[in-house]
Each structure stands twice: as structure tokens, then as C-alpha cells.
């Protein structure tokens, strides 16, 4: 801002000042593409704004309306799992159902959300009156986990992964860390792995010993 004569230009904050989103060349200034740069005031402010927007539109939304949604019925033979009528032929339905069963074991009620033609969440979980939506990521390779998580941007504030193998803790936690760095609207990654249910939220990485703490959770 001190590179411009304010009196001559009549501009207090000129173009290129870090108060303006996108000027650090790391994003285009929209919450969906914002890349957090701690040195950029716009990124810091925009990230907080985006997190508030996504929280208001999902976690606090009246997802309880699904309990009275006539298009969602209990799945025969399943406990506490609901799905849209006539959607069992969708390509990823079985993947969602497998994860839904794991969630029920951990005390959730689950709605398998139908496709709307837009990028929408895959699953709705309810536990003790709290509703959360998740984008399900089918993990075919731990090495690709980072990119798989990032692809969920814009679908839900939470991503859910089911891991069928042990080990590779460092790769997993670093992928989640990168996901939070790249996607400012993300606030949780929920992991189902065997008997474990692990919830990793953004503030998990506020302390430098996050890897050690992650390993202790999985023991």
C-alpha cells in the first residue's frame, strides 16, 4: 500500500494489496477455490467466511426433515439405514451401504442420499440429535488418498473414508492435513477402519505432534 501515493491516486488499498482475494496468485478469490496463505489477509478472512458458510448450510440445516421424507424408506433387512425408493441400482449404492452398516455399528442412523444431478453429499448421519453429511471416498490406494479427498470439495464439509488395511499411518494423516490446507470449507474427515471410528477435524493439526497423536488413537 505504501507503493502508491494515496493523495494522487485516491486509492487507499491499491490493486495487488493482500486485502484483496486472489492477488497472491494462489486462488481466484472464491471460497470454493481458496488456498489458505497465512501471509494473505484475504485468505485468512475468506477461509473463516467459507467455513461459516458451509457450516450454516449443512450442519445447522434442518436435515431432520429426512425423517419425514416419504421418498426415503428403511432398507429391508437393515437396521437404522434409509435410502431413496428405487435407487439401489445406482453404481455406488453398495459402497454406501457397506459404510452405512459400519456407521450403524458405531451408533449412527444413516440416510443414503440419492443423486440430484449436482455435486451433493453421499451420506447423512444422525447421532444424539446431531446431523452431519459426508462425501464418501472409496480408498483404492492409500497413495491416492490425498487427491481423492481433495476431489470431494464442494460436496460436503466432511469426508468419510473406509480403510480395510492397517499401517501407512503417516501417509494417511499427511493426506488429511493436505486436504484441510487445500479445501478451506472442509472441517472433518471421518475414518472407519475395523473397530475404529476416528474423527479428524481441522484443529487436530494445530499442534506439531499430530502424527504421534494419530498413531495413539489407532492403537
Image (cartoon, rainbow, N blue to C red):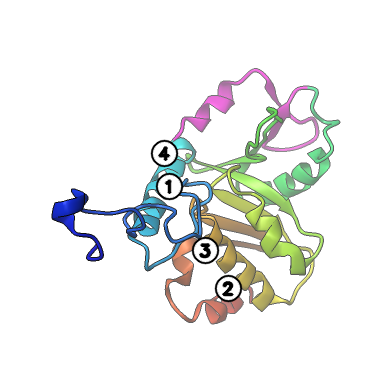
Q: In screen coordinates, is 2 left or right of 161?
A: left
Residue that mark 2 sits on: 217
Q: Are marks 4 and 1 in contact (CB under 8 Å)?
A: no
Spatial CA distance of label 3 from label 2 is: 22 Å
Q: Which of the numbered marks, if any, corresponds to residue 95?
A: none
- Quadrant of image for the N terminus: bottom left
* The residue positioned farthest toward the front in the image shown: 8
Q: Which residue is mark 3?
A: 181
Q: Is residue 206 left or right of residue 83?
A: left
Of marks 4 and 1, the one in the foreground: 1
Residue 193 in sight: no
Viewer can see residue 71: yes
| Sequence-first disc among 2 and 4 | 4
Find the magenta span and give its range.
61-85
Circles 4 and 3 in contact, beta carbons < 8 Å: no
For the C terminus, the image quarter is bottom right
The residue to which callout 4 is attached is 56
**First in sequence: mark 4 or mark 3?**
4
Element under disc 1: helix
Magenta span includes 83:
yes
Image quadrant assignment for residue 161: bottom right
Vertical placement of 180 versus 87: above or below?
A: below
Q: Is residue 15 magenta?
A: no
Q: Of helix, strand and loop, which one carries label 4?
A: helix
Question: Which residue occupies the foreground of this view, 31 or 91?
Answer: 31
Q: Which residue is mark 1?
A: 50
User: What residue is shown at x 44% (from left), y 43% (from top)?
Assistant: 55
Amino acid at each position: 500500500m505504501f507503493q502508491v501515493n494515496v493523495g494522487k491516486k485516491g486509492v487507499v488499498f491499491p490493486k495487488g494489496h493482500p486485502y484483496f482475494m486472489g492477488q497472491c496468485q494462489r486462488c481466484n478469490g472464491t471460497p470454493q477455490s481458496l488456498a489458505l496463505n497465512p501471509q494473505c489477509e484475504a485468505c485468512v478472512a475468506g477461509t473463516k467466511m467459507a467455513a461459516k458458510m458451509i457450516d450454516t448450510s449443512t450442519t445447522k440445516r434442518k436435515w431432520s426433515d429426512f425423517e419425514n421424507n416419504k421418498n426415503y424408506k428403511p432398507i429391508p433387512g437393515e437396521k437404522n439405514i434409509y435410502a431413496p425408493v428405487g435407487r439401489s441400482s445406482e453404481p455406488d449404492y453398495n459402497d454406501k451401504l457397506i459404510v452405512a452398516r459400519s456407521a450403524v455399528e458405531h451408533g449412527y442412523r444413516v440416510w443414503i442420499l440419492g443423486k440430484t444431478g449436482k455435486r451433493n453429499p453421499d451420506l447423512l448421519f444422525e447421532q444424539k440429535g446431531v446431523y452431519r453429511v459426508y462425501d464418501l471416498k472409496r480408498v483404492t490406494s492409500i497413495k491416492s488418498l490425498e487427491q481423492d479427498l481433495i476431489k470431494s470439495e464442494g460436496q460436503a464439509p466432511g469426508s468419510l473414508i473406509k480403510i480395510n488395511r492397517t499401517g501407512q499411518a503417516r501417509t494417511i494423516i499427511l493426506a488429511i492435513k493436505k486436504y484441510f490446507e487445500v479445501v478451506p470449507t472442509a472441517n472433518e474427515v471421518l475414518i472407519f477402519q475395523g473397530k475404529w471410528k476416528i474423527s479428524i477435524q481441522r484443529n487436530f493439526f494445530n499442534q506439531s505432534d499430530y502424527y504421534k497423536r494419530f498413531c495413539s488413537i489407532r492403537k
